[in-house]
Image (spheres, rainbow, N blue to C red):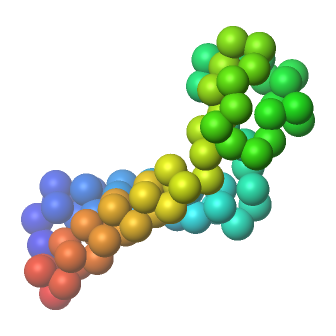
Amino acid sequence: MKPATKIAMILLTLVALAHLWRLVMGVPVVIGGDVAALSDLVGGGAIGRGGWVVPMWVSVLGALIPGGLAFMMYKEHS
């Protein structure tokens, strides 16, 4: 396996694991908002205090797509 392929596979795996961690732990992600308002915005999709809470379903895609790509890269080069 070429080094660039291995690095890409590792990075894709880390992205997928980060999204899985978010799903399991229920960590809220706010884009463009106030960090102090996180406890008020848990639930996803809400707009509050200038921010947007990223819904949990985004992390489902964020785990499946990079995880699937990493798995395909692994199978292609094993």
Picture coordinates of residue 47, whole percent (x, y): 69, 24
Q: Nearer the viewer, residue 3 or 57?
A: 57
In the rendered picture of this protein, how many numbered marks are placed on residues?
Answer: 0
- Residue extending farthest front: 46
Residue at 85% from the left image edge and 24% from the top image edge? 37
- Residue extending farthest top: 50
Residue at 27% from the left image edge and 57% from the top image edge? 7
Task: Using the rendered view, name the quadrant where residue 19 is placed.
Answer: bottom right
Left of 16 or right of it: where is 26? right
Q: Is residue 25 visible?
A: yes
Q: Nearer the viewer, residue 34 or 56?
A: 56
Task: Using the rendered view, name the quadrant where residue 61 is placed.
Answer: bottom left
Q: Is residue 14 visible?
A: no
Quadrant location of the N terminus?
bottom left
Picture coordinates of residue 46, whole percent (x, y): 70, 32
73 relative to 11, above or below: below
Left of 54 or right of it: where is 76? left
Task: Using the rendered view, name the quadrant where residue 36 is placed.
Answer: top right
Residue at 65% from the left image edge and 61% from the top image edge? 23
Left of 58 or right of it: where is 33? right
18 relative to 13, above or below: above
Quadrant location of the C terminus?
bottom left
Residue at 63% from the left image edge and 26% from the top image edge? 52
Picture coordinates of residue 35, whole percent (x, y): 79, 23
Picture coordinates of residue 17, whole percent (x, y): 52, 63
